[in-house]
């Protein structure tokens, strides 16, 4: 009896040990499977409804209802301020206005919409203490894409002196920001107009001026407005990282002519110097035709 009872106890202990080992193996297998699924991106993540656009929306453009839809978005990648209801955007009866360009499929967030308390989307782009001033530039520059929303430019004014009637050009304002080119206020959705867009010919399109809105201080706005009224304004593009101020004295037709004359004189002097160097080289070269022919000399050796 004692041996039988001992065998039973051993059998029970073996069964319990086997069960513990099976449980540990199952847990380890589940851990490995979880790690493999996570590494392969198979782990299921909670997704939330998010309002996204079905097409590109330009800055300062009202967002129509048919340009929005609900999409499932992973909770870990949910943008801050994302909206989950389309009806909430139109609760006041007005369409929301994009403060910046929004690409197709991009979630709608509060930060990308114009704040009604700050005015329209264009007014929301102007920094406090600055003013938005619209100037006219050659349409060829706008079509070429040399100016675009967000670009850094200088303002060069060309005006005629009312007393001396002398025309001069000089930099009036440095390193100002372009807010918009025509109605486009965001570089993400900005596209230069084609020459024959809207059914107009290239000739008539070239005669028109493009309107560019720049951001300046109140004092600078006075200079820009006066220069445009009294003459012409140009906007040279500059590198956004180049913020060093530049000192210039301006240019007049007489100074421009002097620069041209100096350049012509320097070119003529360079050409004359080149001719002199060529002449000296030719003088140093021996004339093969004038060289006398030496008589032949015979050499004898003693036997």
Image: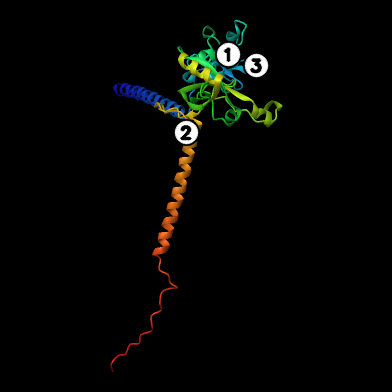
Q: Secondary structure at mark 1?
A: loop
Q: Earlier in the sequence, mark 1 or mark 2?
A: 1
Q: Residue at x 51, y 32 (%)?
A: 253
Q: Residue at x 65, y 16 (%)?
A: 66
Is residue 26 or residue 284 the one in the foreground? 284
Image position of 8 with respect to 195: above or below: above
Tell me whether the residue at label 3 lies in contact with that at label 2, contact meaning CB atoms closer than 8 angstroms.
no
Left or right of 200 in this view: 102:
left
Residue 5 pos. (x, y %): 32, 21
Dot 1: within a 10 Å radius of its alpha carbon, few (fewer than 14), some, or many (20 or more) residues?
Answer: many
Kindly identify which numbered label has been placed on residue 138.
Answer: none
Is residue 222 or residue 117 the one in the foreground? 222
Left or right of 154 in this view: 182:
right
Say if residue 101 shows up in the picture. Answer: no
Q: CA distance from mark 3 to mark 2?
A: 60 Å
Point out the frontmost of discs 3 and 1.
Answer: 1
Tag 3 residue? 66
Tell me whether the residue at label 3 lies in contact with that at label 1, contact meaning CB atoms closer than 8 angstroms.
no
Tag 1 residue? 97
Q: Residue furthest top?
A: 92
Q: CA distance from mark 1 to mark 2?
A: 50 Å
Q: Secondary structure at mark 3?
A: helix
Q: CA distance from mark 3 to mark 1?
A: 14 Å
Q: Residue at x 32, y 90 (%)?
A: 300
Image position of 228 with respect to 280: above or below: above
Residue 222 pos. (x, y %): 49, 15
Tag 2 residue? 255
Q: Earlier in the sequence, mark 3 or mark 1?
A: 3
Q: Residue at x 71, y 27 (%)?
A: 199
Residue 251 pos. (x, y %): 47, 30
Dot 2: within a 10 Å radius of its alpha carbon, few (fewer than 14), some, or many (20 or more) residues?
Answer: few
């Amino acid at each position: 009896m004692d041996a039988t009872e001992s065998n039973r106890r051993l059998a029970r202990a073996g069964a319990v040990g086997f069960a513990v080992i099976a449980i540990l193996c199952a847990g380890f297998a589940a851990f490995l499977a979880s790690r493999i699924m996570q590494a392969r991106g198979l782990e299921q993540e909670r997704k939330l409804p998010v309002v996204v656009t079905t097409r590109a929306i330009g800055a300062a453009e009202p967002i129509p209802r048919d340009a929005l839809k609900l999409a499932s978005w992973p909770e870990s990648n949910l943008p801050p301020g994302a909206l989950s209801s389309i009806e909430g955007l139109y609760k006041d009866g007005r369409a929301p206005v994009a403060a910046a360009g929004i690409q197709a499929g991009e979630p709608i967030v509060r930060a990308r919409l114009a704040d009604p308390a700050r005015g329209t989307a264009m007014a929301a782009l102007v920094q406090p203490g600055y003013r938005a001033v619209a100037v006219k530039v050659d349409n060829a520059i706008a079509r070429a894409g040399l100016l675009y929303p967000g670009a850094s430019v200088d303002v060069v004014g060309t005006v005629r002196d009312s007393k001396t009637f002398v025309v001069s050009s000089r930099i009036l304002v440095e390193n100002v920001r372009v807010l918009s080119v025509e109605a486009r206020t965001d570089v993400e959705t900005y596209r230069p107009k084609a020459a024959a867009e809207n059914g107009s010919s290239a000739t008539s399109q070239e005669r028109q001026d493009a309107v560019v809105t720049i951001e300046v201080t109140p004092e600078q706005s006075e200079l820009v407005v006066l220069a445009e009224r009294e003459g012409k304004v140009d906007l040279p593009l500059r590198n956004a990282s180049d913020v060093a101020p530049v000192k210039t004295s301006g240019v007049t037709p007489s100074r421009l002519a002097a620069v041209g004359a100096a350049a012509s004189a320097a070119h003529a002097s360079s050409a004359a110097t080149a001719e002199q160097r060529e002449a000296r080289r030719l003088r140093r070269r021996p004339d093969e035709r004038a060289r006398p022919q030496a008589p032949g000399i015979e050499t004898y050796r003693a036997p």
